[in-house]
Structures are given as C-alpha cells and as structure tokens.
Image (cartoon, rainbow, N blue to C red):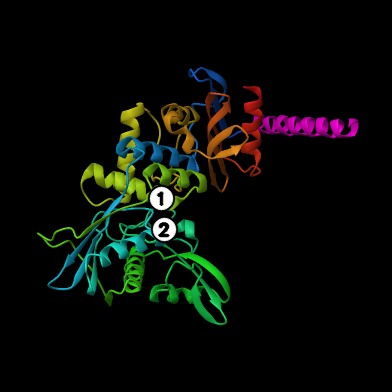
C-alpha cells in the first residue's frame, strides 16, 4: 500500500513539475501572447494580450460564431433538385452544403427514385453560389484531404478514398461507389489505400459529385447517362425534391472544431459571404465579410482575417480579441473538444505557429483563455501551459 501511495504521489509531482516547466518555457518566449480572464471578464493572467499574432486555425472559432449567429444551431443545409421531363435533365442547385457525404447522396437517390424518375439523360449543375474556378489560400496545393478546394456542390468533402487490390482500383469505402474520376486517381499511388482531394480545379470536384450521384441513382434502378453539364436553373422549372441534410449546423461545426476541418470552415465562410452580398462568393468577399462582420459586432481595430479556416499567414488577431470572441461563444461552448482534462479549446498549427483558445473549466466556471505562440515550440507545449493555467486558476 505504501509503495502504491508513493507511486501515486510521484505521478502527481511529475505532472506538476512538467506543467511548471511549461510555464517557465512560455515566460522565455519572445513572440507569444496570453490572456486568461475569470467568468466576469477580469484578467487573471496576461502577457502581450494586445499584440497581434498569426492565429492559425483558431480563426475557425470566428467562422463558427458568425455561422451560428446567422443561421442558428439547428439550421440544416438544403439542396434543391429539379427534373426537366422534356429533356430528361436532372438539375442540381448547389447550396454550399459542406456535409454531402455518401450517406446523404444515397438518401437523395432514394428520394428521387420515388418520384418515378426512370431515365436521366444528363445531370446539370448550377454552381453559381460560388465564383467560378474559386481557389482559396492554402487549398489545392497538395494531394492531402485537408487541402481540398471548396465548391458549391461537393461530395465527401471533395476527397476520394480508393485502394489498389490485386492490381485493381476499388473504393476504400464500402458505401461509396467507384466512379470514373475516382479511378483516374490511380496514377497518384502504386499500392495500398489513398485518400486524396479532388484536385486544384473545382470543376473536377463538381464532376466527381455528379458521377457519385449518378452511381447512387443507378443503384436505385434509374437509368442515368454520362453527360454532365453546367449552367443555371431554367426559369419556371419547379423543385422536384429538396434535400435537408441529416446533420444540423451545430453538428457540422462540432466536427469542424474537433478535427479542424479546413473544408467545412471554408464552405461556411463562402456561404455566409454569398448570403450577405447576394452574389457569387469569392476569396475577396470572404475577406470583406469576415472583417466587416467581426468589426461591426466586436468593434475591433487592428486585425485581419483573410479566410474562414485560418490557413492564411496574413491573418492577425490578438489574445484579447480571441477572448472577446469566446465570451460571446459561451452559449455554444459544448461544441468545443476537450484537449486536456478541463481544457475545452480549439488549437491552431502552422509552421512556427502554435495557438490554443477556449475555456479552462472547473465545475460550472468556464474561464476563457487565448494562448498565441508565433515561434517554433514543441507540439505539446500549448496543452501543457493550458493544463497548468487550469490548476492555478
């Protein structure tokens, strides 16, 4: 029993020593800021809290806040489908829904088949919600899934998951049919499994969406041709089916914050800009929307937001501004992931950038904090600092 007690005490002291070492390391950093306040907003600890830093993915907190304020947590994205009987054309109006995954497309195909649509000669896409050929900062530069470009119509976050089995390309997801565009990805790898984005050109993402929709329709017994067109919905054509996503906006944002999904954040920012300005969303309109909306709500000065995901190195926020944001975000605090015991926060990482913003939680007290480091440090330092702060405050 004594031996067990000694081991237990040793672990406690080791944990405290590690945390103390983390705060000591922070005190020696020259390009870092910190602010912790109590629930009333009174500062408990601050270091360069009014200095601007690159925020990285903590920008997603701002995107989430603006989306929840505009649409409400229970909002569901809706995608309209129109069938032109005369030309046997299925029109799809892009809504920017960031969560049109295979399960949603399967439901769409089932509903359309129940409309007694037996033959579709072509699928036509209306993607006018976003600017044509749109590529945002930090997207489309690699094959990585997190670099997927946004598009008004997107399937599976504009990524393809395939594998080579006995020299043959097959889908790596049992519920996702293999399409011609997915097969064309085989040149990117020699063996194993690969999840990649659909490429830098948004037209490829839209093509994949149409192919996947067609594949699900065929599974429901609908004859579908291979023609894919783009344009605007013909005047007077009535909605055949409106699909409401099975996930609420709050559920989408919770996933975005947990996995730091750049694609979802970019889609939300573009949809917000299109909704505000009533014109096809662009990178410039996203920048205009993010900055003007945050300035109007918080009366901030000296800040800059270029995108909704936090990929741009031109983004600038202050620890104080992030804490201002967190005070207003408190009603949706449950959407944040728990990074360490009692630390619910959003992290941000770029080369030479390590940030963390959220709440230090004890009982019913959720104390907002923002930690911004703009120099190279160990990956776990931010979490260790937050854990130490929670112990102290």
Q: In this view, does 23 lie to the left or right of 301?
A: right
Depth check: 374 or 356 in front?
Answer: 356
Q: In this view, does 273 lie to the left or right of 55?
A: left
Please say if the residues under marks 2 and 1 sit with CB atoms less than 8 Å apart: yes
**Residue under pointer 2:** 157
Q: Which residue is drawn at 24% across and 52% down?
A: 280
Q: Residue furthest right?
A: 2
- The location of residue 117, given as percent across then percent down, is 22, 70
Checking the image for residue 303, the label placed there is none
- The location of residue 104, given as percent across then percent down, is 37, 58
**In terms of secondary structure, what is the magenta stretch mainly?**
helix
Checking the image for residue 264, the label placed there is 1
21 in the magenta segment = yes
Q: In which quarter of the image is residue 175?
A: bottom left
Q: Bounds of the magenta span?
A: 1-29
377 in the magenta segment = no
């Amino acid at each position: 029993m004594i031996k067990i007690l000694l081991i237990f005490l040793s672990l406690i002291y080791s944990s405290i020593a590690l945390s103390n070492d983390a705060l000591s390391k922070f005190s020696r950093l020259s390009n870092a800021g910190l602010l912790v306040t109590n629930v009333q907003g009174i500062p408990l600890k601050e270091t360069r809290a009014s200095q601007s830093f690159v925020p990285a993915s903590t920008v997603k907190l701002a995107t989430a806040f603006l989306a929840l304020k505009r649409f409400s947590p229970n909002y569901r994205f809706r995608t309209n489908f129109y069938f032109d009987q005369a030309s046997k054309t299925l029109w799809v109006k892009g809504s920017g829904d960031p969560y049109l995954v295979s399960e949603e497309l399967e439901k769409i195909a089932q509903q359309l088949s129940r409309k007694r649509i037996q033959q579709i000669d072509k699928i036509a896409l209306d993607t006018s919600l976003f600017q044509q050929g749109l590529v945002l900062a930090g997207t489309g530069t690699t094959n990585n899934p997190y670099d997927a470009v946004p598009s008004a119509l997107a399937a599976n976050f504009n990524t393809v998951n395939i594998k080579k089995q006995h020299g043959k390309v097959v889908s790596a997801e049992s519920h996702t049919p293999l399409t011609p565009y997915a097969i064309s990805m085989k040149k990117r790898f020699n063996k194993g499994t690969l999840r990649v984005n659909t490429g830098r050109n948004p037209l490829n993402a839209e093509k994949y969406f149409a192919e996947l929709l067609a594949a699900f329709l065929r599974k429901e017994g609908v004859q579908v041709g291979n023609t894919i067109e783009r344009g605007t919905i013909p005047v007077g054509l009535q909605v055949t089916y409106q699909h409401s996503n099975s996930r609420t906006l709050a559920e989408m944002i919770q996933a975005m914050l947990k996995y730091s999904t750049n694609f979802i954040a970019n889609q939300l920012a573009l949809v917000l800009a299109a909704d505000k300005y009533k014109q096809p969303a662009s990178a410039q309109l996203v920048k205009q929307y993010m900055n003007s909306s945050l300035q109007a709500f918080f009366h901030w000065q000296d800040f800059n937001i270029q995108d909704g995901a936090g990929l741009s190195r031109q983004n600038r926020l202050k620890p104080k501004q992030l804490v201002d944001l967190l005070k207003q975000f408190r009603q949706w605090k449950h959407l944040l992931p728990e990074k360490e015991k009692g630390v619910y926060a959003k992290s941000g990482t770029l080369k030479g950038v390590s940030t963390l913003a959220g709440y230090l939680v004890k009982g019913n007290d959720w104390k907002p904090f923002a930690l911004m480091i703009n120099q190279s440090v160990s990956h776990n330092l931010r979490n260790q600092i937050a854990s130490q702060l929670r112990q102290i405050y």
